Image (cartoon, rainbow, N blue to C red):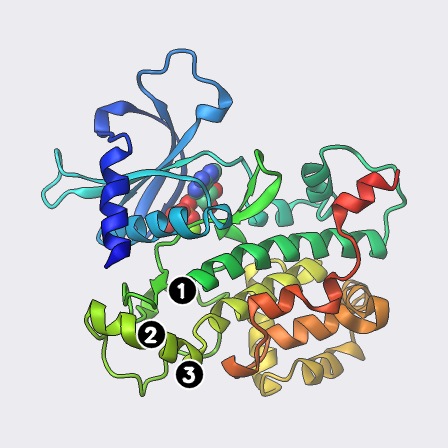
Amino acid sequence: FDMFVLAFVERLFRPTYGKDDFVLGKKLGEGAFGVVYKVSFAKKPNSKKEDDLVLKKATEYGAVEIWMNERVRRACASSCADFVYGFLENSSKKGGEYWLIWRFEGEATLADLMQSKGFPYNVETMIIGEVQDLPKGLERENRIIQTIMRQVLFALDGLHSTGIVHRDIKPQNIIFSEGSRTFKIIDLGAAADLRVGINYIPKEFLLDPRYAAPEQYIMSTQTPSAPSAPVATALSPVLWQLNLPDRFDIYSTGLIFLQMAFPSLRNDSSLIQFKRQLKRCDYDLNAWRTSVESRATPDLRRGFELLDLDGGIGWELLSSMVRYRARQRISAKTALAHPYFDKEGLLALSFMQ
Ligand code: ADP
Ligand code: MG
């Protein structure tokens, strides 16, 4: 109840905007449920780069996405793109559409950066803001990938600690924030808030088959149908413990880790092929490794070598994320304490010069 009062009071004191306050710029993306544009404020003649905004015109799921973003802003703001405002715009179409506004965090998603031949060195430059004059090699690449993984898991832990499961974690939904020089999560359009039962029943068709965990339902099918909001508030910590719905996101994050280590798995078709092979190995990552290692391409061998550094702690972490059973997967919080992250990340690297 307090949360709703708080939301209402906050709403009262925040500036309100309407359609005419924004000037549309270039289109950034178009999904099944909305279109995303770069925009600027109409009445700010000397606007700077920091004033750039992003607008999503969303259909039916826009209301949930606004709700999720407002909750994130109050509970774990640094996890996600900086949300400015959301409203129902119903001056044109019948039924209207939801407009969501964020600060423009930066030009590149992790997907864009991973598509570049320079990955992961291109990310190193963005995080520490200078060109490193160090020899390129596995150790250095591992250090960069480790820093990216730590930032993504940190953001994810913020969401999960708030009671939110994202359900669409993928490189396309991880943006590099030029302001904070860190990766943040975007696109809460498929997210569920277990604590209050918002978007409680997973909409399977929202899940991206490339990155989705094998479980069809995030909550066990034994879970009774969606309780009304107050009931869900009382029940959901228990349900969370029972079903560990956050581990769905962990599986997706594990696949991102895999793609960062193995360049040949970065395109859709090879990722889908990997998922098929893994299924054939009964989702046993070690069995998959054995099955491909004998005839491995130099690229695959190099990926294994990277994950085998420091006694194989990278491989160990990956294996604890990509597991068939949700309850056997590591949580975001526990993953952050994994020995893979014991070594200093990129910041330390820049001090060492
Ligand atoms: P969709 O539902 O279309 O997937 P997203 O929220 O993922 O919508 O946004 C689509 C694209 O717009 C992203 O992949 C990213 O390139 C860009 N984008 C979204 N939010 C931001 C932001 N806050 N700053 C910069 N770019 C963004
Ligand atoms: Mg998206």
Q: Which residue is mark 3?
A: 242
Q: Residues at badges 2 and 1 in contact (C-beta under 8 Å)?
A: yes
Q: Position of residue 260 (x, y in %)?
A: 67, 58
**Quarter of the picture holding the C terminus:** top right
Disc 3 is placed on an element classified as helix
Disc 2 is placed on an element classified as helix
Side (left or right) of 194 relative to 299: left
Q: Which badge, 2 or 1, is on the more N-terminal residue?
A: 1
Q: How far is the residue under mark 2 from the one under mark 1?
A: 9 Å
Q: Which residue is mark 1?
A: 163
- On whether ligand 2 comes within 8 Å of the CB at mark 3, the answer is no
In this view of the protein, can residue 34 be seen by the observer?
yes
**Quarter of the picture holding the N terminus:** bottom left
Q: Residues at badges 3 and 2 in contact (C-beta under 8 Å)?
A: no
Q: Nearer the viewer, residue 127 or 230?
A: 230
Q: Nearer the viewer, residue 287 or 250?
A: 250
At horizontal 53% and vertical 61% (from top left) the residue drawn is: 157
In this view of the protein, can residue 217 be seen by the observer?
no
Q: Is residue 285 above or below residue 127?
A: below
